[in-house]
Amino acid sequence: MEIRQLTYFVTVAEELSFGRAAQRLQLVQPAVSQQIRRLERELGVPLFDRSSRHVRLTAAGECLLPEVRAVLAAAARARQVAAGIAAGTDGILRVGTSQGLGERLDHILEQLRKIAPGLRVRLVSAPVAERITRVRAGELDAAFVRAVTAAPGLELLPLWQDPLTIALPATHPLAAQPAIQLPQLSSIPLRLAPREDNPPFHDLIVGACADAGFQPLHGPPFTTPQDALAEIGTGTAHLDCALHRRRRPDTRAPGGVPPTCRAHSANLPRGGPRPARPSPAAPARCLRIGRPDPNQRQT
C-alpha cells in the first residue's frame, strides 16, 4: 500500500469520477484506474461501483474513506515535522550540560525558544568525556564543554569565556589584599574535582599552577560550588581554597595570565572560637589575580 494510492482513492471518492480525479491529480486516467485496482486487490475488497453512467463508493469504500484521510493527514504532519527538523525549527534537541552554566543556559534556551518555538530541548547532565562520546555517537546533538581544545570528528564552537575565581575565608591574610598572584596560593590546600570528572578543567588548573612554579596541595574534594563555598566560608573545613568558574554573564576574564581569576571571600568570625553553628556568610569581597607588578620587588 502506497501513500499515492491512498491519495488517488480519496480524490476519486471526492470527485466520483476517474476522469475528473485524473485531471485534478494531473495524471492520465488509466494511471489512476490502475492504482485503484491495485489498492483494491491488496485490501481484498472493491472500493467503487463502476458503470458507464456513474462511479460510487461501495460500503467498504465508505468505511475506509475516513481512515484513509486520517492516514494522509498523519503523513502530511510527518513531512512537516521532518522539514522542521531538517531546518532546525522543530523536533527535539538533545544537549549535554554540566554544573555552573547558570544564567547563560537560561539565556540560550530563551533565544532558542524565540528562534524555533516548536523545538523541544532535552538537557542531559554527564561528565565531559561522556558528553563528547555521546555527541560523537549521535546520542546527543550538541554539548557544552569547557577547556576542551580538540575533539576528533567534532566541531568546537567558542561561545564565551568564563573567568575563574578563587574562594578564600575572609580571615585569611590574602583576602585583605587588593590583588594576589597565583604563586601566593602555593601553601594553601586546593579543593579540586577529581581529574576523571573533568580532565580538561583539572589539567587547566594544575597546568596554571605548574606554570606559576608550584604543585597545588590537595585539599578536600570539590563537590559543588555551593557546598565548597559554604564549608570554606563558615569554617566547617580546615583552611583551604577553591577555584571555580564564575557564572556572571557580564564578567569577562582579563587576558594575559592563565588562568586570570577573581577571588571571592566569605566572612568568618574574627578571633575567638568558631561557633558551633555556622553564621550566615556576609557579602563577598572580590579580589583579582593579575599580572605581577614589574615595579614590585619579588621575595
Image (cartoon, grey):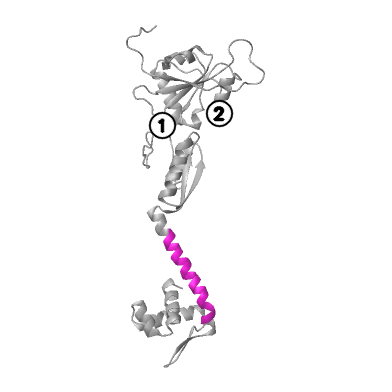
What x and y, as percent, mark residue 191? Answer: 52, 22
| Local SS, label 1 | loop
Which sits in the foreground, 143 or 44? 143
Q: Residue at x 40, y 49 (%)?
A: 115
Q: Residue at x 48, y 66 (%)?
A: 74
Residue 76 counted in the magenta span:
yes
Mark 2–mark 1 distance (CA, rounded to whole Å): 21 Å
Q: Which residue is mark 1?
A: 250
Which sits in the foreground, 232 or 151? 232
Amino acid at pointer 1 = Asp
Indicate the quadrant containing the C terminus: top left, top right, bottom left or bottom right: top left
Which quadrant would residue 232 be assigned to in this image?
top right
Is residue 19 toward the left or the right of residue 124 in the image?
left
Identify whether 28 is placed above or below 177: below
Identify whether 18 is placed above or below 125: below
Which residue appears farthest toward the right when viewing the image?
Answer: 276
| Local SS, label 2 | helix
What x and y, as percent, mark residue 160? Answer: 38, 34
Label 2 vs label 1, nearer the camera: 1
Identify whether 281 is placed above or below 114: above
Q: Residue at x 41, y 79 (%)?
A: 35
Q: Residues within 10 Å of mark 2 (few under 14, many from 20)?
A: few
Amino acid at pointer 2 = Gln
Q: Residues within 10 Å of mark 1 (few under 14, many from 20)?
A: few
Residue 204 counted in the magenta span:
no
What x and y, as percent, mark residue 194? Answer: 51, 27
Q: Which residues are magenta?
A: 61-81
Identify whether 55 is placed above or below 95: below
Q: Residue at x 44, y 80 (%)?
A: 14
Magenta stretch, main secondary structure class: helix
Q: Which residue is mark 2?
A: 226
